[in-house]
Image (cartoon, rainbow, N blue to C red):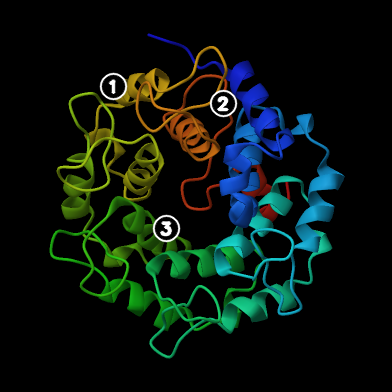
Amino acid sequence: MAELAADKHVKYIISVEKRKDSFENVVMEHLRMNGVYWGLTTLDLLGKLDAVDSQEVIQWIMECQHESGGFAGNVGHDPHILYTLSAVQVLALFDKLNVLDFDKVANYIAGLQNDDGSFSGDVWGEVDTRFSYIAICCLSLLHCLDKINVEKAVNYIVSCKNVDGGFGCTPGGESHAGQIFCCVGALALTGSLHHVDKDLLGWWLCERQVKSGGLNGRPEKLPDVCYSWWVLSSLIMIDRVHWINKDKLVKFILNCQDIENGGISDRPDDAVDIFHTYFGVAGLSLLEYQGLKAIDPAYALPVDVVNRIFIGR
């Protein structure tokens, strides 16, 4: 079986950041904050976070913060809850959460909670259970969960549960592995996993594994490396990860690497990108692949970073 080309992936991630005029950078310009989170978390899991200039990154992150307290995907763009979480996660990686005004960020997120307990992504009002997870994860990292109505937030997520045990983006929405991660993650972080039918959901999730060993996000879809994260983390949180074939999944992820130039793609022989490189390495971390730091399935941050925030070590 192929091995993880760790050094090549480190070089690939650093090169993406340096090629400002590359196609990848141009199309990701508006969501650069997410890309920085994906890239830097991958470097940390590989034990190479020191390959970047932390001061430069932190300065850029703070330039993306708006007066509202929220963060944009890049300088000169509008704030959104998505980028706010990525900003907080990157600052956590560097142990620099102290540069934030916690109340300011928390009040921005709390202001996005709706009367039914759901969350909007920004002032334009789109509602999605992704935003519920993001709000809860971000506020938890800042020790500010008391800023929102957690009970209402949990009840809204539970209202998005389907008869197959899965969750959709809004009540009645189709079950999808990405949304399931968001809902299970939010319930895990609020101590509310008793709302999940673990056996029913576990079966739905383990049925996402196809013959190649890869995982898909919904029935009849092609496998994709990113679901190595969405499906696996959910299975771990509900204690059903032993229901899939881990060895076959490891093999699938490793087969999606560009062995020569670094990076991981969605499926073997496709073009690599920073998104799938992160989810591939994060998936391998969840699978306890040798040489990788452990990642927390709920916070999507290295375990040592999470311990530093909550235990102080």
Instruction: Give the residue type at disc 1.
Output: Lys
According to the picture, the residue beneath numbered tag 2 turns out to be 292
Residue 208 vertical placement versus 7 (above, below)? below
Label 1 packing within 10 angstroms: few (<14), some (14-19), many (20+): some
SS at circle 1: helix
For the residues carrying marks 1 and 3, which lies nearer the camera in this image? Answer: 1
In the rendering, which numbered label is found on residue 185? 3
Asked if disc 1 and disc 2 are in contact, CB closer than 8 Å, the reply is no
Task: Report the front residue among 40 and 139.
Answer: 40
According to the picture, the residue beneath numbered tag 1 turns out to be 248
Say left or right for 308 vs 112.
Answer: right
SS at circle 3: helix
Looking at the picture, how far across and down is residue 240, in whole percent?
27, 42
| Residue at screen point 71% across, 28% down | 48
Say left or right for 95 vs 279.
Answer: right
- Tell me if I can see residue 267 in this picture: yes
Give the quarter of the figure containing the N terminus.
Answer: top left
| Residue at screen point 38% across, 34% down | 225
